[in-house]
Image: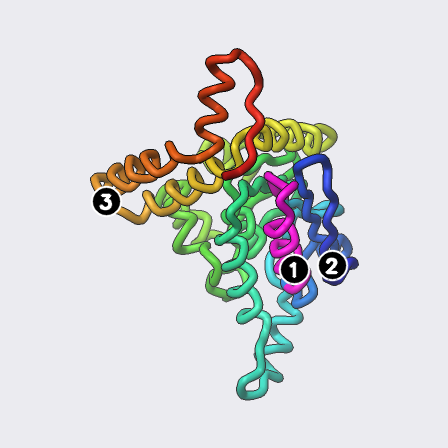
Amino acid sequence: MNEQAVLIEKRNQVAWIYLNRPNDMNAISREILEGLKEAVQTVEADEEIRVVVLTGTGKAFCAGADLKELMHDLENKQPGQTNLLDGADSTFGSLAKLSKPLIAALNGITLAGGLELAMSADIVVASERAKIGDAHANFGVLPGAGGSAKLPRIIGVNRAKYLLFTGDFISANQMKEYGFVHEVVSPEELESTVQVIAEKIAEKSPLVLQKMKQLVHDGLEQPLELALKQELLSLKAHTQSYDMNEGLSAFVEKRKPEFRGY
């Protein structure tokens, strides 16, 4: 992993992944994509890590794709050569498949591909100074990682169209009203607030967290009746797990459960 572009810091059972191109507002480059994909593989494989946080260094979470690099790709791509868009598809796909809860901590500017990165998260917490928008239309570019597909599902069709069509930046508080951001805090409180949330989640059964995340994602793509049946079937299978039996035993014995993830 390129340590200059993406950094990982482990805090107890929480892994913090930092996009680290502060002078370029953490714009998405090949280095960012390669580092982020490797970071996802690292945290997925580490059984001690139960929650993952994605954030940025400097004044931006992520300002979107590095347009200079994208332009270079378009002008110089050779047949069969992988470019920035191909890499983004692969990396965003790995984020979408992450089995562990993912929190986006929006420390600043969050635009275009940065907004699409944030939409990969299960929970979004933002600094008061964060400005959030789609911005693709400002540069004659189409979204390619969820701007038109996922944003309407999260904040509603008309609100999403407004952001997509105008390219406007809006406040974190406005995005909280839209239901995208869970909590807005001061810049100084962002990391401590997110760490508290992450550690609260990390205390839960990793098996339950993984299955809950999958059920929610699957349920959104299914008719309600089918999603309810799948949920019940998953619960019945889950009754055979160590973690469910440990949780029930701990309740009866009035102690804190010790979950093992199976």
What's under tag 1, amino acid-wise?
Glu
**Alpha carbon separation for disc pair 3 and 2:** 41 Å
- Residue 190 in the image, given as x and y percentages of width and height: 68, 32
What's under tag 2, amino acid-wise?
Ala
| First of labels 3, 2 by sequence position | 2
**Alpha carbon separation for disc pair 1 and 3:** 35 Å
Residue at 55% from the left image edge and 38% from the top image edge: 124
- Residue 202 in the image, given as x and y percentages of width and height: 59, 32
| First of labels 2, 1 by sequence position | 2
* Residue 242 among magenta residues: no
Residue furthest bottom in the image? 79
Q: Which residues are magenta?
A: 34-53
Horizontal placement of 215 versus 11: left or right? left
| First of labels 1, 3 by sequence position | 1
What's under tag 3, amino acid-wise?
Pro
Q: In the rendered structure, are the residues bearing label 3 and label 2 in contact, judged by CB atoms less than 8 Å apart?
A: no
Q: Secondary structure at mark 1?
A: helix
Judging by the rendered image, the residue that carries numbered circle 1 is: 38
Identify the mark at residue 223; answer none if there is no mark: 3
Judging by the rendered image, the residue that carries numbered circle 2 is: 5
Which image quadrant for residue 83? Answer: bottom right
Q: In the rendered structure, are the residues bearing label 2 and label 1 in contact, judged by CB atoms less than 8 Å apart?
A: no
